[in-house]
Amino acid sequence: MKLKQVPEDFLVDELSNRQPSKSGTFSLYRLTKQSLGTPEAVDRIARAWKIPRKQISWGGLKDRHAITTQMLTIQKGPARDLERDGVQLEFLGLTGKPFTASDLKGNRFCITLRALDADRAERAVTELKTLARNGVPNYFDDQRFGSVGNSGEFVARSWIAGDYERALWLALADPHPFDRSAEKKQKTILRDHWGDWTTCKQELDRSHRRSVITYLCDHPTGFRKAFALIRPDMRSLYLSAYQSMLWNRCLAAELTARCRPEDLQPLTLKLGDVPCHASLPESERTALADLNIPLPSGRMKLQPGPLRERIEAVVAEEGLTIPEVKVKFPRDCFFSRALRPALLLPRQLSGDVADDELAAGRRKLVLRFELPPGAYATMIVKRLTALPEGS
């Protein structure tokens, strides 16, 4: 099976009820991007129109390896379109407030799986009925953990422990498998000369990373303040990644405790295998559909009971207690306080099989469905493709 062979194989359309009006201090746009993450697309818009990045607001992060559409607002933004470097911005009108996550209804997906043999493609279509009925575990998928480098360490873990130097090294110098050549070079400079800030500054290209190092030239051990110089949106991503990892472990523990071993099978994610139900008794499916698990943090409110005990056990594996999962400095970013459904139930799920024009003699499966905000379409794909051969 092959996924994302061409950008058109993964299409995402954001769903929102936000409508433009004829007045307001914010301009509303529809952003279409290809082979770019949302933050990178926003950076290009800010540079093209020479506007402060903080004036741009959006509701969610969309997959880099896809063609996606989403809404965004720009405070006092230009009343015109923009097309540049993989970014298309369509001016829709004015609105009275910034676009945020609260404006999201969900996302509509059209995903093409390629290079399937005919039998496997048909079995996957048959499995759609079971998947629509039983859902899949609502894990945060690999895209959530893009900030985790080759070290496997989370920036936020060092951050909340007060080890600002380690947090800074992980944020600026830890290599990632998909770093582009220019990024690899910048990180190598930092790893080779860490602590020799003058040399680092001389060799680094102009960038936000170099600005942080410039501060260290004057304050060689000022790691606490240097870490705070990292953009707040990036630091928020570090917190989200760590909190999401903890939540995934909580869901895994909950499934293991609730489900019969014969109803579970391993599903491979970037950070390791997690349990996934292949089938569920109706009573357990209903119970899981009604279960919402809080994102672990010191702000979490949860009564004593088995669920809280399992969350405490997960956090204890990190050498922490629940009250310790909090940010002490800087106080401009926080762990989220929210509930997340344990079960992901796709809406309007369908699949069509056809000849694969990119692979002679093979078949393709085109999936269409809608998901609520924050859910990962790739979990649906992974559940389908986890089918054992011959099942």
Image (cartoon, rainbow, N blue to C red):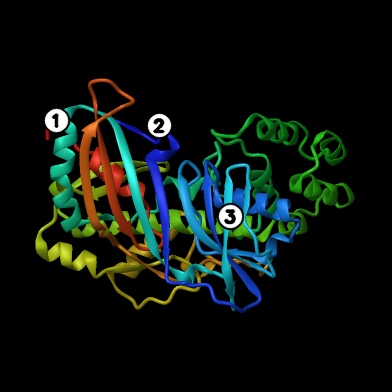
Whichever of labels 2 and 3 marks the residue nearer the N terminus, that label is 2
**Apparent side of residue 331 relative to residue 176 in the rendered image (left or right):** right
183 or 283: which is nearer to us? Answer: 183
Q: Residue at x 55, y 34 (%)?
A: 178
Which amino acid type is marked by label 1? Asp
Q: Which of the 4 image quarters holds residue 191?
A: top right
Q: CA distance from mark 3 to mark 1?
A: 42 Å
Q: Residue at x 27, y 20 (%)?
A: 360
Q: Is residue 388 visible?
A: no
Task: Name the amino acid, label 2.
Answer: Gln
Query: Quadrant of residue 225 in the image?
Result: bottom right
Whether 115 is drawn above or below 25: the answer is: above
As displayed, is residue 71 above or below residue 125? Answer: below
Pointer 2: what residue? 5
Q: Is residue 255 left or right of residue 50?
A: left
Residue 20 in percent (x, y) is at 53, 72
Identify the residue position indicated by label 3 in the image: 89
The disc, 2 or 1, on the residue closer to the chain's N-terminal end is: 2
Residue 14 at x, y percent in the picture: 43, 59
Residue designated by label 1:
119
C-alpha gap between disc 2 and disc 3 = 25 Å
Q: Residues within 10 Å of mark 1 (few under 14, many from 20)?
A: few
